[in-house]
Amino acid sequence: MKDSGRTAEISIGGENYSFPILSGTTGPDVIDVRKLYASTGFFTFDPGFTSTASCESSITYIDGEAGMLQYRGYPIEELAEHSHFLEVCFLLLYGDLPSASQLEDFMSRVTNHTMVHEQMRNFFNGFRRDAHPMAIITGVMGAMSAFYHDSIDINDPVQREIASIRMIAKVPTIVAMAYKYSVGQPFCYPRNDLDYTSNFLRMCFEVPAEAYPENKALSRAMDRIFILHADHEQNASTSTVRLAGSSGANPFACIAAGIACLWGPSHGGANQACLEMLLEIGTTDRISEFIKRAKDPDDPFRLMGFGHRVYKNFDPRAKVMKESADEVLSVVDSGRKPTLQIAKELERIALEDEYFVSRRLYPNVDFYSGVILDALGFPTAMFTPIFALSRTVGWISQWKEMIAEPMQKIGRPRQLFVGPVERRYLPLHQR
């Protein structure tokens, strides 16, 4: 960031104060209020921090008005079309697209770390058979710090690098193991001769009695889901990772904190809610009924998958996801297709309705991702774990950037206190 040379003036009780206005490379300028309390005795009040820049970052840029998402300056549409997930991981972690030799080395390091310590199997046996996969992966990710002592010193850049590779490599194995445990099937070990995404699908769906046939179209759709969810600026889970990391917590604990935050239905669970809505609608001839309900202020029903906290235009990820949905539904069981038909018709009707257009309620990434994951054969309980798998590289990239920031300090939001003023303790017999 740089000082723009401009200032913001604030007047409090007849006293005037000036605060610098800082500029990034693009996007809105910010008012530097770090000295606000020291200068004035006042804090800012910003519930949800929606008007607060909590850090400076060079990783992901979003322009919600324009419907733009960029990783390190590269449009998400170009990456989804031309790149693959591990190349995007390299980009997020190191800032640039890799050369051929750099990519080969990076992919080799990830591939050779995909197995987890054999004793970690015991953690899974400690969960009830019907435990939610998110509960399992949150616990197992946090437990990794108990197994990999050689990569928890956050002050050692070599250890930070090793921890980063380990998490990117092992999280598909952990997520697949959580799925296998939830359906009562034996774990499937990773194979080094498969690419990252194909290996994940095989670990989820192969059984001892029958091999899982590799399908390039399905692997490509899964890979795109990983790319589109890899990072999304300072959202709730990423901010959680940064806040946990600001205390000096080990990287595995920080990522476990992010996973726990992602579990919330307002964050990572939205695609599950969207698919459940489409299944509830059932047939295209019932769409108008649900559109009417969505517009009724007295009806609690909401159209899931429309609108976004940041995007006030089309979510650029939704466009790519829609293309992937068409590709997947062209090669899977035709029994899955009605859900896609409902989604497409619902999108068409909503985008022709002034109620939704005037409110800029456009489809978001969750609208089609649930349809794709359902078509691939995943139960809804696995949607958020797959989101966590995808987002792990973003969390790690943000964590590494935060650790290296010279101005980094422990996060400590303040509050507007509205509780009782000072009271005196009364002995029990006087109350």
Image (cartoon, rainbow, N blue to C red):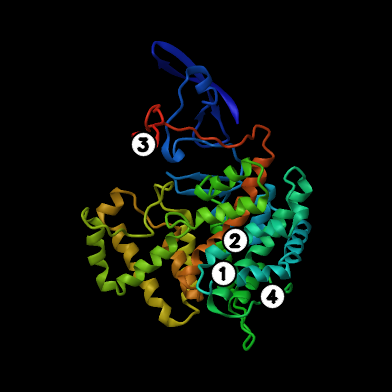
Q: Mark 3 vs mark 2: give the one in front.
A: 3
> Is residue 99 something that shows in the picture?
no
Q: Mark 4 vs mark 3: give the one in front.
A: 3
Labels 1 & 2 near each other (Cβ < 8 A): yes
Left or right placement of residue 16 versus residue 230 in this view: left
Q: Earlier in the sequence, mark 1 or mark 2?
A: 1
- In this picture, is 110 found above or below 249? below
Measured in 3D between alpha carbons, the distance from the residue under mark 3 to the one under mark 1, in whole angstroms, is 47 Å
Badge 4: how crowded within 10 Å, few (<14), some, or many (20+)? some
Residue plotted at (63% across, 55% down): 393
Which element carries disc 4, helix, strand or loop?
loop
Q: Mark 2 vs mark 4: give the one in front.
A: 2
Badge 1: how crowded within 10 Å, few (<14), some, or many (20+)? some
Q: Which residue is mark 3?
A: 429
> Which of the numbered marks, if any, corresponds to residue 127?
1
Q: Which residue is mark 4?
A: 189
Quarter of the image with the N terminus in it = top right
Residue plotted at (67% across, 47% down): 95
Q: Earlier in the sequence, mark 3 or mark 1?
A: 1
Q: Which residue is mark 2?
A: 139
- In this picture, is 416 found above or below 320? above
Report which quarter residue 428 is drawn in.
top left
In percent of width and height, residue 329 lies at: 46, 75
Q: Mark 3 vs mark 1: give the one in front.
A: 3
- In this picture, is 14 found above or below 338? above
Q: Nearer the viewer, residue 327 or 136?
A: 136
Q: Earlier in the sequence, mark 2 or mark 4?
A: 2
Q: Mark 1 vs mark 2: give the one in front.
A: 1
